Amino acid sequence: MNIQAQQQQPGTPQQQGQPPQQQMPQQQERLDNISKVKSLMPALKESLMAVFKTAAQTFHQNSLVDIGSLKGVDVPLPRFDKNIEEFYSICDQIELHLKTSIACVSQGGSSQRYLPLPVALTRTEASPSVVNPTPASPQVAAAGTNQGGDPSGGGASVLTYSQFLATVRAQVSYAREIHHELVAAAQNVASGD
């Protein structure tokens, strides 16, 4: 018995070491909305089958009552309303994930259109004068580059994280100014009537 226990112990840590490796792809998969939709599809299929099965059973029992073969409800049937509610709940979750995916794709397209330069993946802190530069215009901030098209003066066309933050701040400020101007114009038009 001790030999069997000793033989099983070396295999146990290997089995215990495997789940953390498997959890990494699962955690990464949970972050993706399309993967969430794919994972909800089997539940949606089962829920739809349950709705159809409950509806068929209810129709059959009601038809037996209608023709007189069955006097009353003897066998409790699964509730149709609960099954259909579960089906709609899963549909709502799928719709939410798809809408979020569409918004992400739209935001990515806008990012590529209005800020075509890639952003450096590492966050490096620079001197305070570089972290909060004041661009001359939103177009200059959106470009994030100097006259030569290079943010750092070297050969790469990559925005640093601090340049990216300055660009975003400038774009938000510009959008806020446009919003205030539109609100003021609307109030002027409304008061002029």
Image (cartoon, rainbow, N blue to C red):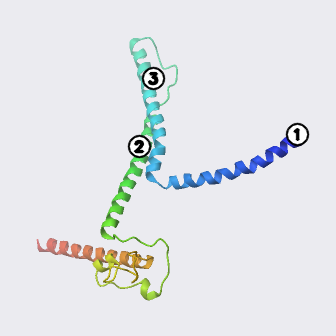
For label 1, the residue is 1
User: What's under tag 1, amino acid-wise?
Assistant: Met
Residue located 43% across and 79% down the image: 162
Does 27 sit left or right of 87 as displayed? right
User: What's under tag 3, amino acid-wise?
Assistant: Gln
**Element assignment for label 3:** helix
User: Toward the viewer: 140 or 178?
Assistant: 140
Does 86 sit left or right of 183 as displayed? right
For label 3, the residue is 57
The Cα atoms of the two marked residues, 1 and 3, are separated by 55 Å
Sequence-wise first label, 1 or 3: 1
* Image height of 39 relative to 113, above or below: above
x then y, percent, for residue 85 = 44, 39
For label 2, the residue is 91
The Cα atoms of the two marked residues, 2 and 3, are separated by 23 Å
**Element assignment for label 1:** loop
Q: Is residue 80 in view?
A: no
**Element assignment for label 2:** helix
Image quadrant in which the C terminus is located = bottom left
- Residue at the extreme right: 2
Sequence-wise first label, 2 or 3: 3
x then y, percent, for residue 1 = 88, 39
Residue located 32% across and 75% down the image: 171
* Image height of 20 relative to 57, above or below: below
In this rendering, which labeled residue sits more in front, label 2 or label 3? 2
Does 19 sit left or right of 133 as displayed? right
Specify the quadrant of the image occupied by residue 154.
Answer: bottom left
Does 116 sit left or right of 58 as displayed? left
The Cα atoms of the two marked residues, 2 and 1, are separated by 54 Å
Sequence-wise first label, 2 or 1: 1
x then y, percent, for residue 95 = 39, 48
